[in-house]
Amino acid sequence: MTASPAGEGSTPRPVFDWLIWLALAAVAGAYIRAIFFTPPEALQGYAQKIYYIHVSAALNAYLAFGVVFVASIVHLWLGDVRADRLAEASAEVGLLFTTVVLTTGPMWARPIWGTWWTWDARLTATLFLWFLYASYLVLRGAIDDPHMRARYSAVTGIMGAILIPFIHLSVYLFRTLHPMPILLKPSAPSMPGDMVETFLIAWVAFTLLCIALLRARYRYGELKERAAMLEAGR
Amino acid sequence: MMPDTTAYFHAAYIVAAVLYGGYTLSLWLRARKLRQRLGQRSSRG
């Protein structure tokens, strides 16, 4: 197995650095823009603004689980422990973003659909994705041997990510209450220009937050491995 | 007339901020605890 850069000799890197402050400032900017400088939609009222944080979270959950997929393949192929560490970090961050999706979605659905939850294809598949990656993290905590842990969780990580295209296409494949894509579709966006701008700002800000948290969680993983190595007396 | 859905909008933005902030804080606390453990180990030699 490839040597880990979290080895004993070097000084551990700080978990948080300038990137997290930049990301938090960007998210604060996106919040201000969405709350104070974007008009509410005429039919849905202010609840439509949930779209900016809900869809940004969903796209970043896809991104994070996509990283788990690629890193897990790289780990199985090359046996690189850094890829396993990246997959673990990305799964945790992806789970955070999916939790935001699953909590903000019902807050939009209650006033618009008249119900907090419905068992339609996209909602159910997203909940299933959440449980899959929650069990991925439980699995990691349950296996002591690092090689076995990395291999089993890589397989679970790849299987989980296969669900993502299905979730994205579920609104086309099944009869569902969930709205069709407003922006990510071949035709022109079904939103006015200033709302599209707000969404793009929110998307960039939350992507920055996703990357900053991913980097911080990766470095925390390095620190954890260093502590484990020291405690094992190696 | 535009429906009054402001409460749901406020609640969603607050919940998202709490989740992101809570996770960031938990990561910082976990890292601090680990650093303290590492520091104790290295000071014991």
Image (cartoon, coloured by chain):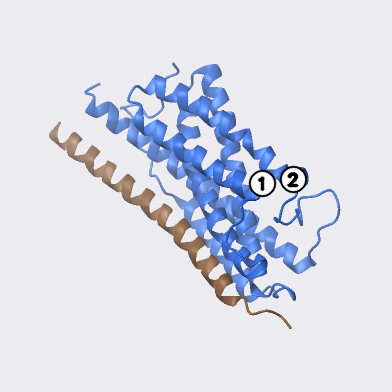
Chain colours: A blue, B brown
Which dot marks residue A36? none
Give the position of the C terminus of chain A as an image quadrant: top left
Q: Secondary structure at mark 1?
A: helix
Viewer-proximal residue, A20 or A43?
A43
Question: Which residue is label 1 attached to?
Answer: A121
10 Å crowding of disc 2: few (<14), some (14-19), many (20+): few
Quick one: which residue is furthest to the right in this view?
A187
Give the position of the N terminus of chain A as an image quadrant: top left
Question: Which residue is label 2 attached to?
Answer: A174
Check the image and report above or below for A90 versus A71.
below
Could you say where residue A72 lies in the image, as x and y percent from the top left? Answer: 54, 27
Report whether residue A90 is seen.
Answer: no
Chain letter behind tag 1: A
Which quadrant of the structure image shows residue A191?
bottom right
Give the residue at x 50% y 48%: A212
Could you say where residue A40 lies in the image, as x and y percent from the top left? Answer: 69, 75
Q: Is residue A139 left or right of residue A157?
A: left
Q: Secondary structure at mark 2?
A: loop
- Disc on the earlier residue, 2 or 1: 1
Could you say where residue A4 lies in the image, as x and y percent from the top left? Answer: 41, 24
Q: CA distance from mark 2 to mark 1?
A: 7 Å
Could you say where residue A102 lies in the image, as x and y percent from the top left? Answer: 55, 54
10 Å crowding of disc 1: few (<14), some (14-19), many (20+): some
Q: Amino acid at mark 1?
A: Ala
Callouts 2 and 1 close, C-beta under 8 Å: yes
Viewer-proximal residue, A172 or A57?
A172
Give the residue at x 63% y 67%: A114
Chain letter behind tag 2: A
Q: Amino acid at mark 2?
A: Phe
Q: For the image shown, how many numbered marks are present on the structure?
A: 2
Give the residue at x 15% y 31%: B45
